[in-house]
Image (spheres, rainbow, N blue to C red):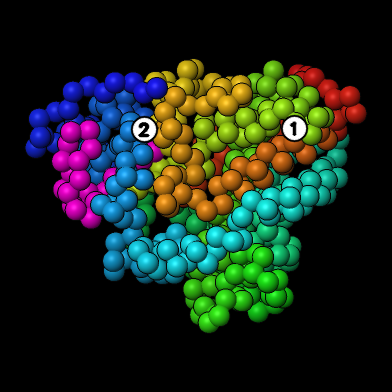
Amino acid sequence: MTQARPSPPPRGRRPPGPSGGRGAANAADFAVDPLGFLTRAARDHGDVVALTSGNVLLVHPDDVGRALVDRDRNLVKVRPGERRRGGTGFPLAMMNSEGEDWARKRRRLQPAFRSERLAGLRSHAHDAVARTVGSWAEGRTIDVHKEMSRLAMRIGAVHIAGRPLGGEADALADAVAAVMRLTSSPVRLPTWVPTPVNLSLRRAVRALDASLRRLIDGHRPDGGATALGRLVEERPRAPFPEIRDELATLLMSGYETTADALTWLVHCLGTAPEADGALAASARAAGADGYAAACAKEALRLYPPAWVISREAARPVEFGGYLLPAGTVIGLSQWVTQRDGRWFPEPDRFRPERWLDGAGPVHRYAYFPFGAGARGCLGASMALSEVEEVAIALRSQVRFEPVGPEDVRPRPALALQPVGVRARVFKEHPRGARWSR
């Protein structure tokens, strides 16, 4: 079921928007508070919003689906001539490619993300959780994001590279931190300007290059079972820059987004004691009732690691009755659409039960934390399973008591990072324990 849309406007009209969609003040407002700006823009101006003269936000799931699925030929992610390495980019990676080059790279990696590999991921996730929990003292206050980052690194590295990371883990973490500092800054200077943030990024990327070369050179053949195996063992072997870019994006995106999703889940459970108790009961039954999966989906709805994605019109396209010229940058915001009360009753409340018994959003494209269509995330099902399995393993062994939840805030960088999530950890007894405060 979808809700009826208002009659389309006369053709030729520009979409409405803050300051008429032309003011430079909009770009400044977005830079300072992107989540608030996009939320207000959609609330005040509707489903097709002009943010600047060349940027349009699409809010309605009909348009999300058409942009990501039906209009794939009219919209591109990367313009020809923009594949430069520098700053936050790894241009030779699949996610930064287009056309047949993109299709070739996706076909190459696809076998490493097949469903039959989930069993191995599940076993490794539980082992990694056991080691992590074993390092926590009873009643200790932890920085949840820091701990979930270490945990995600342990799990993701084995899946992608086939073995735990040694010193490479530090280089990867430093590179991710540098990228996030850069992309969360409201004012960004060109990467050649020697600012402290840019210099830190350059150092981190150089160290990452050296670490990835060691990882690639030390790879032991696995028959192409892992992503690294697919990259290194393919004949003819891809050149180092291409393998490096692909491996960097896989490790960085998998590590950071999983850590963010797990941290947001811990935060959400801290605001919903009944849901936390239900998850504890489900975890004691090894998640057989699907409640952990529902918790994972709901946390990704409220706090999607990918909070906005964009495409560019390669030729004129129409959305919501507005004809948008070629060159228009089209934004789709998971943060905005997934918190829309038309598709999710009580949209700001953590309600895992909305995903139980086959339920879900009333519109297929009201929920797209991993994108959709041909360019949807290759590892989406694996990422969701990882969050689910870690949630089961964690909640079966410990409960988290939130510390200062009122101080938690999202930081929209390349991913939606959780800031200020802290908790005291208590070892769970065999029969479990209800939430206590």
Q: Which residue is mark 2?
A: 61
Q: Amino acid at mark 2?
A: Pro
Q: Residue at x 44, y 24 (%)?
A: 362
**Precedes in sequence: disc 1 or disc 2:** 2
Q: Which residue is mark 1?
A: 287
Could you say which quadrant of the image residue 41 lies in? top left
Secondary element under disc 1, as helix, strand or loop, is loop
Where residue 269 appears, as percent x and y from the top left, is 66, 27
Which residue is the extreme one toward the right?
430
Q: Amino acid at mark 1?
A: Gly
419 relative to 306 in the view: left or right: right
The quadrant of the rendering that contains the N terminus is top left
Marks 1/2: CA–CA distance: 31 Å
Q: Is residue 238 visible?
A: yes
Where residue 369 appears, as percent x and y from the top left, is 49, 40
Q: Residue at x 64, y 51 (%)?
A: 115
Where residue 324 appears, as percent x and y from the top left, is 18, 44
Q: Is residue 419 visible?
A: no
Q: Residue at x 36, y 30 (%)?
A: 39
User: What residue range appears in magenta?
Assistant: 312-333
Can residue 8 be found in the magenta stretch? Answer: no
Q: Callout 1 environment at 10 Å: few (<14), some (14 to 19), or many (20+)? A: many
Q: Callout 2 environment at 10 Å: few (<14), some (14 to 19), or many (20+)? A: many
